[in-house]
Every structure is written in C-alpha cells, then in structure tokens.
C-alpha cells in the first residue's frame, strides 16, 4: 500500500483495471473524469471536469488528452 489518497471509480472493469466506460472522482474531489478507459488509463472519448467549472471534452490516448 502506497499511502496515497485514492479516488472513487464507478464503471466497467477488466480484472482490477478500469476498462470500458466509467467515472473517476479524484480524492481531492476537485477533478473528475467521465469516459472511456483502456487497461487502467483514460483512452477514447471522455470529459475531464474541474471544480471551478472548466473542462476538457475530447479524445484521450494512453492516459493523456490528445486534442486541443
């Protein structure tokens, strides 16, 4: 166990990995991701929202935003 705070995930799994459609709310509750996952990483179409109302909606690849 790393001792790092863990957020809350709701969605599809492959074994113990986030895989398919799902939502993840980070432990600080300021950040949230709703969208597709591939083997534990953000991948495909998704929305990354922040507590101040700003957000990125678009494509993700290997855990990172891949568009502008």
Image (cartoon, helix red, strand yellow):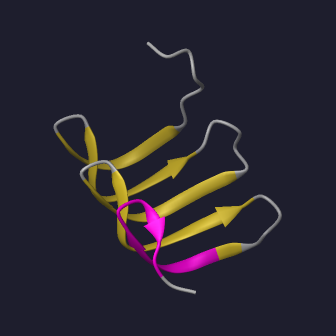
Q: Is residue 12 magenta?
A: no
Which span is picked out in magenta? 56-66
At horizontal 77% and vertical 58% (from top left) the residue drawn is 51
In the image, residue 56 sits, relative to residue 15, either above or below, namely: below
Answer left or right for 42 relative to 31.
Answer: left
Quadrant housing residue 5: top right
Q: Residue 18 placed where, x, y %?
A: 30, 47
Question: How many discs mark residues in the rendered view?
Answer: 0
Q: Residue 45 placed where, x, y %?
A: 39, 77
Q: Is residue 57 magenta?
A: yes
Q: Residue 17 placed where, x, y %?
A: 26, 41
Quadrant housing residue 68: bottom right
Type of secondary structure dominating the magenta stretch = strand
At horizontal 44% and vertical 43% (from top left) the residue drawn is 9
Quadrant housing residue 29: top right
Q: Nearer the viewer, residue 67 or 9?
A: 67
Answer left or right for 57 relative to 22.
Answer: right
Answer left or right for 40 relative to 3.
Answer: left
At horizontal 63% and vertical 36% (from top left) the residue drawn is 27
In the image, residue 2 sits, relative to residue 14, either above or below, namely: above
The residue furthest left is 15
The residue furthest right is 52
Q: Residue 34 placed where, x, y %?
A: 48, 63
At horizontal 66% and vertical 53% (from top left) the residue drawn is 31
In the image, residue 34 sits, relative to residue 45, either above or below, namely: above
In the image, residue 37 sits, relative to residue 68, either above or below, namely: above
């Amino acid at each position: 166990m790393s001792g790092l705070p863990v957020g809350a995930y709701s969605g599809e799994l492959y074994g113990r990995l986030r895989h398919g459609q799902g939502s993840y709310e980070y432990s600080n509750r300021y950040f949230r991701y709703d969208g597709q996952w591939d083997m534990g990483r953000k991948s495909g179409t998704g929305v990354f929202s922040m507590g101040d109302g700003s957000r990125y909606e678009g494509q993700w690849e290997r855990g990172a935003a891949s568009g502008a």
